[in-house]
Structures are given as structure tokens and as C-alpha cells.
Image: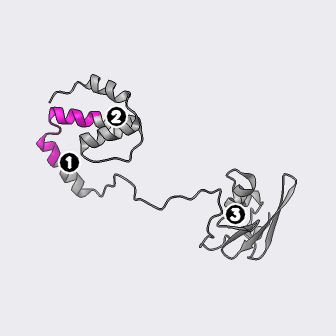
């Protein structure tokens, strides 16, 4: 099988990502979840060249098999639960409370843009405007709308909640 690499590259460059995924499945015999167009193109071209020119020598295949037996490699990370948006209140934390925090039941107060903000410290989380957050940073983000260190926002820099 002869592959005109320049022609294949030109053909692949005009394909959409979904078309490249279909081509990948055709060439490799398995589907991919990849969405990076450049990566898909490179993998497809590599595979077409390997098929056309015979791929690796038998000696190289044996050496690769030896190396693979010795290595615990992972090509893809394990699938995990989807990450929840930090704009929504998170579930309370199960970790020990930080020593910079006052005891549970105390209320943190902070003037922010002319508004006095009150946050109640719970045994496992923080209550702000009726919602429970798992971290002080999540509360600070809910207040400011941007990623903010909760301890800095509430000025809890030393042990026990004092400056």
C-alpha cells in the first residue's frame, strides 16, 4: 500500500474534528474521545505511514514489548466524577478545620463594596445567604464573582482568625 503523505495531509487539514474522529476509527479500528485536530491528524498520518511501510521491525517490537512489561504506564487518566461548577454551593468539607478559623458558630464579617457580608462558620462548611459552601474560597468567589483566597478575603491571616 502506497500512501501519498502530502495528499493525505491536505485531505486531513480540511476535515472537521468529527470527520477526523471517524477517520481515526477507520484507520485504528477503535474510536477516540480526542478533540484536538492537530493531534488527530498526526496520529492518523503516523498510522497510515506505518501501514504503508510495514511499521516497526520485529526487533523493535520485541524491545517495545519488553519495556512495556516493565512499565506501569497509563495512556489516559482514570475517569472520575464530573467536576461541579464552583459558582454553585459545594458540599461541606470533611477535613479538619483550619487553625486560622475561629470556632464553629462564629460569624465572619467583612465590608465589601459598601455591603456588610456575614458568613457563619459551621462545623463542616460555611453558610452564606442560606447556602452552605465547602470552603471559604468558595464563599469569597460567590461574593466577588472571581477566584479569591478566602482567608485573604476575610483577612484571616493568623491562627484563631486574628491578623
Q: Gap in Å between the C-alphas at discs 3 and 2?
A: 44 Å
Image quarter for residue 78? bottom left
Residue situated in front as seen by the camera: 54 or 30: 30
Badge 3: residue crowd in 10 Å (few <14, some 14–19, many ≥20)? many
For the C terminus, give its image quadrant: bottom right
Q: Gap in Å between the C-alphas at discs 1 and 2?
A: 24 Å
Badge 1: residue crowd in 10 Å (few <14, some 14–19, many ≥20)? few
Image point (76%, 72%), residue name = 102
* Helix, strand or loop: magenta stretch: helix
Residue situated in front as seen by the camera: 61 or 141: 141
Residue situated in front as seen by the camera: 135 or 63: 135
Which residue has dot 1 on it? 64
| Sooner in the amino-acid sequence: mark 1 or mark 2 | 2
Q: Is residue 69 left or right of residue 92?
A: left
| Callout 3 touching callout 1 (CB < 8 Å) | no
Look at the image and say whether residue 49 sits in the magenta stretch: yes
Any mark on residue 113, and which? none
> In this rendering, is residue 18 above or below 153?
above
Look at the image and say whether residue 76 sits in the magenta stretch: no
> In this rendering, is residue 1 above or below 111?
above
Residue situated in front as seen by the camera: 24 or 65: 24
Q: Position of residue 162 (x, y in %)?
A: 79, 66
For the record, the magenta segment spans 45-62
Which residue has dot 3 on it? 136
Q: Is residue 116 left or right of residue 131?
A: right
Q: Position of residue 32 (x, y in %)?
A: 34, 47
Task: Please state the total of marks drawn on the protein image.
Answer: 3
Amino acid at each position: 500500500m502506497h500512501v501519498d503523505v502530502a495528499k493525505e495531509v491536505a485531505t486531513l487539514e480540511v476535515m472537521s474534528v468529527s470527520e477526523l474522529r471517524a477517520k481515526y476509527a477507520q484507520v485504528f479500528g477503535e474510536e477516540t474521545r480526542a478533540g484536538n485536530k492537530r493531534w488527530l491528524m498526526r496520529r492518523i498520518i503516523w498510522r497510515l505511514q506505518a501501514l504503508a511501510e510495514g511499521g516497526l521491525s520485529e526487533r523493535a517490537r520485541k524491545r517495545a514489548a519488553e519495556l512495556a512489561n516493565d512499565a506501569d504506564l497509563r495512556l489516559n487518566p482514570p475517569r472520575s466524577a464530573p467536576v461541579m461548577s464552583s459558582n454553585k454551593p459545594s458540599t461541606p468539607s470533611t477535613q479538619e478545620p483550619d487553625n486560622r478559623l475561629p470556632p464553629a458558630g462564629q460569624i465572619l464579617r467583612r465590608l465589601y463594596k459598601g455591603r456588610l457580608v456575614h458568613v457563619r462558620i459551621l462545623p463542616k462548611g460555611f453558610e452564606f445567604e442560606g447556602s452552605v459552601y465547602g470552603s471559604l474560597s468558595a464563599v469569597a468567589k460567590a461574593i466577588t464573582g472571581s477566584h479569591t483566597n478566602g482567608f485573604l478575603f476575610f483577612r484571616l491571616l493568623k491562627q484563631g482568625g486574628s491578623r
